[in-house]
Image (tube, grey):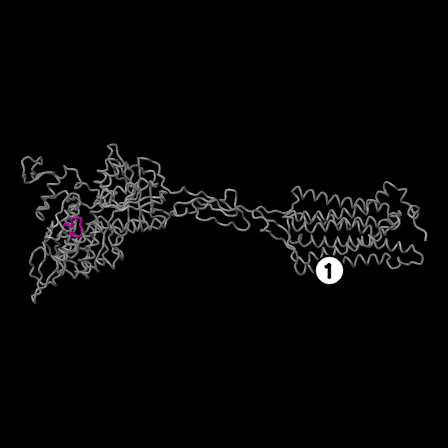
Amino acid sequence: MELLFTLLNVVMATISVSGGNATCSLQGESAFSQLSKDGDIIVGGLFSFHSSSEIPDMSYVFKPPPLKCKSLNFRAFQYSQTLIYAIEEINNSSSLLPGVFLGYRIYDSCTSTAIGVRMAMALVNGNEQTVLDEPCSKPAQVQAIIGETYSSVSMAIASTIGPFGISIISHYATCECLSDKRKYPSFLRTIPSDYHQTKALAEMVKHFGWTWVGAIRGDDDYGNSGMAAFTEAAEQIGICLEYSLPFFRTYSQEKVVRIVEQIKSSTSRVIVGFLDNWDLESLLHVFHEHNITGYQWVGSEAWIFDTELATMDVYNILQGAIGLAIPKTTVTGLKDFIFDIHPLKSVGSAAFIELWEALFQCTFIKLNESENTSVCTGEEKVSEVENTFTDMSLMPIFNNVYKGVYAVAHALHNLLGCTQTCPTKKQPDPLTFLEHLKKVHFKTKDGEEVFFDENGDPPAKYEIINWHTNQEHQHEFVTVGLYDSSFPPYDRLAVNMDSIVWAQNSKQVPRSVCSESCPPGTRKAVQKGKPICCFDCIPCAEGEISNTTDSIKCHQCNQDYWSNTRRDECVKKEIEFLSYEETMGILLTVVSIAGAFMTVSITTIFFRYKNTPIVRANNSELSFLLLFSLKLCFLCSLTFIGQPSDWSCALRHTVFGIIFVLCISCVLGKTIVVLMAFRATLPGSNAMKWFGPPQQRLSVLAFTLIQVLICILWLTISPPFPFKNLKRYKEKIILECSLGSNVGFWAVLGYIGILAFFCFALAFLARKLPDNFNEAKFITFSMLIFCAVWITFIPAYISSPGKFTVAVEIFAILASSFGLLFCIFLPKCYIIILKPEKNTKKQMMAKVPAK
């Protein structure tokens, strides 16, 4: 409806050019200023002197009457007084625009886009007369326009007169969209853009830990654009909106009820209000009727420090509200000037009368004697009344008007080349003036710095305002923090948490989250079909941690570390190897030493009885060499215990391989000696001639050297080395010796196996020789044990985990060593110690068979 009326006004105000006279005539109704004063250069003003208007009949049957404004707005008079004060101050200044007298024309936009555009055109065209009879190409009637208060009206005005280059400086229109210089090239403002306000609001909401909030926005350019910017800023820092509801004071009852139902069904406890004070005033009564209380309100600067709204909140719906406001400031002398309204009578008698009657609730002309309204005397004092007009809480906004007028004056001063006096009083070209206006940089008399950025916006600074309730149950505005966009990101917001009073007069910060925070050791997993703020907490997997609250993913520990039970810290993995300190290591060490001690004891016995027949019967030299190698076999198992190192890994397998070959070579030599000795007893046999002591030594040396050669090749080509096995267990490191070359390892074992099998075969053939030479039976049995142990060792070695692999290898070494020691030498020790009567040459020869 309003857009249609705007179009109708534009059509009716079309400038018509008649014939060749090129004169302009006004089509439609004349527009008259509320307040005006002539001057060399005129500054325009557009303020909402009335908060609403009557909707005309748009039936198209007859010409609609002019819009009639109603509901006087005291704030617009305060803005007007500020504009007049600034102009009067400039006119009285000897340093700023000396010799140039500024005038003003202030119009009423009636909080209407249509009327606002029409009045802006009136300011530009000066169309207060029906017939102007002037050239259509005349210059604009005003140098610049201060206003409008509201973003929607400002957008319509800026887009209409922007192409003409007429500068517009708003004191209160904050919509981020107005920073777009392609759409609004001549628009500037002295209040920060909503771009900064929405970022500040989002950071403040995040600071208080609210990630799940609702929102109510004005269904206009200010509310829709601001809420879109807030939503974008909020989502970037992890805040979700459960709902974002539009509202306008002209909404039907049905729409309002839907808003109420949405709020009641929600789970969020915080409501961000991005709407103006009049819209919120309309909602207060509705919220009280439906018992919507106890919510934490977050407000934009449009209403958070509005005293009229605070007065109307008698039900404490907004108790504890917190939001952003323009920092408090003062303009010296302005308060007294605003209170002195008598001069308005000379610059706008109709406006003066309307203001006076509304201010003092009286009338100059009493039409009906029955009326209760008193008659105005003209002697009433502003200081004796208390209402919106006497409320100075919007002094920061008054200051914005003041700065806007001074910005115009400084731009004119620079453009006209003023020094001691201004060389000309001619109104500059609008586009040239606009370029100078964008570059102004000055300080006010109270020391505030004024300038515009490339978007025509000032720097953003806000105070954080909190609504406190005093003992008289009235709201008070308390500053509890600051926000400065010029600071580094992490220092922009400063809040005194101890000074804040929350909803329902609580000192405890309200909770408003969709899901409780995920503690360290877990990660967030978004619930299907819901916003990112609604999530489940999933414990981190093994080997992963999260050490922060609300972590979105778990981090893998380094390969040498593992997660603790709480999954919030990586701890160094347990390093596992067969050590001397653990029970298994101690037992194996004791057994190894015991085996070596037994070997030494048997060696001592054999040495003590070395000249007895039983010792000398089967080459005592090989027996002593075998005992020596068995002692080394027991001791070499100790190299497998302890933390693997370069030298221990290189020694354990090679030394074991060489010693075992030496041992098996000795057993093999003894077996061959038994066979040769039996053959030597046969008539005409000279077998021992071919396998006497020199040959026995040579055979042992040759068999051993082959193993030595294999080991040298292994160590040269690819030696064993310490290795961290990270694959077998996730939670610990197995410190073991890598074989280096599997071929080398199995070549060593294979060679031992070949010798053992060969020795077993020969011993098996000699098992039925006469008892005098029955050592072959014991060798057969010992080699059977040896082969059984090492055959079973292979699968056990492959399948054993961690340190048990080493334990299996040690066990095989000890078992085979004990098998050889017990089977070959214990029977002889039994005879030497317990049956010495059998240890004679006669006994040894008694059972020699006759041939």
Asked if residue 39 is positioned above or below residue 385 in the image, the reply reads below
Q: Position of residue 471 (x, y in %)?
A: 25, 32
Q: Quadrant of residue 417?
A: bottom left
Few, some or many C-alpha atoms within 10 Å of disc 1 (few <14, some 14-19, many ≥20)?
few
Q: Which residue occupies 85% across, 41% down?
A: 833
Magenta stretch encompasses residue 6: no
**Tag 1: amino acid:** Leu
How many badges with numbers are in the image?
A: 1
Asked if residue 783 is positioned above or below residue 432 in the image, the reply reads above
Q: Position of residue 28 (x, y in %)?
A: 10, 55
Asked if residue 180 lies left or right of residue 355, the reply is: right
Q: Which residue occupies 89% across, 49% down?
A: 770
Asked if residue 568 lies left or right of residue 774, the reply is: left
Nearer to the camera, 482 or 71:
71
Asked if residue 25 lies left or right of residue 224, the reply is: left
Question: What residue did someone put label 1 on?
Answer: 709
Asked if residue 658 is positioned above or below residue 264 in the image, the reply reads below
Secondary structure type for disc 1:
helix
Q: Position of residue 796 (x, y in %)?
A: 68, 49
Residue 520 is at least partly visible in this image: yes
Q: Residue furthest top?
A: 471
Residue 95 is at least partly visible in this image: no
Nearer to the camera, 333 or 168:
168
What residue span does the magenta drawing correspond to? 106-115
Q: Position of residue 187 (x, y in %)?
A: 22, 56
